[in-house]
Amino acid sequence: MDSRAPSFTDYLRKAEERLGGALGGSCRVAVYHEMNKDLLKIISEIEDERFRSELRYSERELTIRSKKRGFTCFIVYVDERPMAFVFGFDDPEEGAYFSDSAATLIERKGVGSILTALEALYCIEKGYRCEKMITEDLDESGRRLVEYWARFGFRVTGRHPKIGVEMRLELTQENVGALSGKYIP
Ligand SMILES: CC(C)(COP(=O)(O)OP(=O)(O)OC[C@H]1O[C@@H](n2cnc3c(N)ncnc32)[C@H](O)[C@@H]1OP(=O)(O)O)[C@@H](O)C(=O)NCCC(=O)NCCS
């Protein structure tokens, strides 16, 4: 019997299988560390569909973010059509990863949770000690975002009227194990 812990690549394959089952298609999750024209188009199109205008990043803003140290972007493709993304990069705090933006065109089928679990697994494997993010309590469609992120273990660390709600997930083996066990069993 192979007693080694599953690697991030093993989880990526499991996530693809699980998403394929949930979405009824062939699923692929790609990981990028550099921006290119196709990736800009994919993120912009999903953001246009899912975010109100003031929350969308321009191509210039996306390009600037992609040049930050540690930039990592996951894209979910269903039958080769891009459906969801999450991206982030190193936070100024040492050992912290800032998860900047995430969205999916197919909601409530587990895509968001699987991407969150994958990102956490990726981060812990890379040696990050925590993940940080900024969100809002309620968005314009009534999504309770603080509650949504809290279910993955993120806790509120600050509230700023102009910036939003700061949240943080400690990347312990226990927290990440619970996340992957629930969403990528
Ligand atoms: C937020 C978002 C990424 C969630 O993705 P998703 O694929 O729909 O989420 P999932 O299907 O994985 O759902 C995860 C859990 O949240 C719950 N959930 C999902 N959407 C919810 C909603 N609108 N209200 C309450 N609960 C919700 C699900 O029931 C599920 O619960 P469970 O873990 O107990 O089964 C997606 O709604 C989205 O793209 N929103 C627009 C962009 C956005 O707001 N991004 C986040 C910015 S901080």
Image (spheres, rainbow, N blue to C red):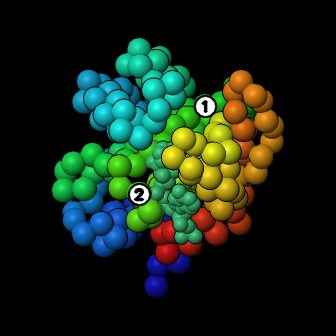
Can residue 125 be seen here? The reply is no
Question: What is the x, y in percent for residue 31?
Answer: 38, 43
Q: Which residue is mark 2?
A: 107
Residue at the (62%, 52%) spot, across then down: 144
Q: Which residue is mark 1?
A: 90
The vertical placement of 99 against 35, above or below, is below
**Eye-nearest disc, 2 or 1:** 2
The vertical placement of 180 against 157, above or below, is below
The vertical placement of 84 against 45, above or below, is below
Q: Residue furthest bottom?
A: 1
State the residue in front, 101 or 2.
101
Residues packed near mark 2 inside 10 Å, few (<14), some (14 to 19) or many (20 plus): few
* Position of residue 88 in the picture relative to residue 10 (left or right): right
- Disc 1 marks a residue whose amino acid type is Asp
Quarter residue 41 falls in:
top left
* N-term mark: 2 or 1: 1
CB under 8 Å between callouts 2 and 1? no
Quarter residue 16 falls in:
bottom left
Q: Residue furthest left?
A: 79
Question: What is the x, y in percent for residue 60?
Answer: 41, 14
Question: What is the x, y in percent for residue 143?
Answer: 56, 51
Residue at the (40%, 49%) spot, across then down: 104
State the residue in front, 35 or 60.
60
- The kind of secondary structure element at disc 1 is strand
Ligand 1 within 8 angstroms of badge 2 C-beta: yes
Residue at the (71%, 66%) spot, across then down: 174
- The kind of secondary structure element at disc 2 is loop
Residue 69 got which mark?
none
Can residue 27 be seen here? The reply is yes
Residues packed near mark 1 inside 10 Å, few (<14), some (14 to 19) or many (20 plus): some
Question: What is the x, y in percent for residue 157?
Answer: 80, 42
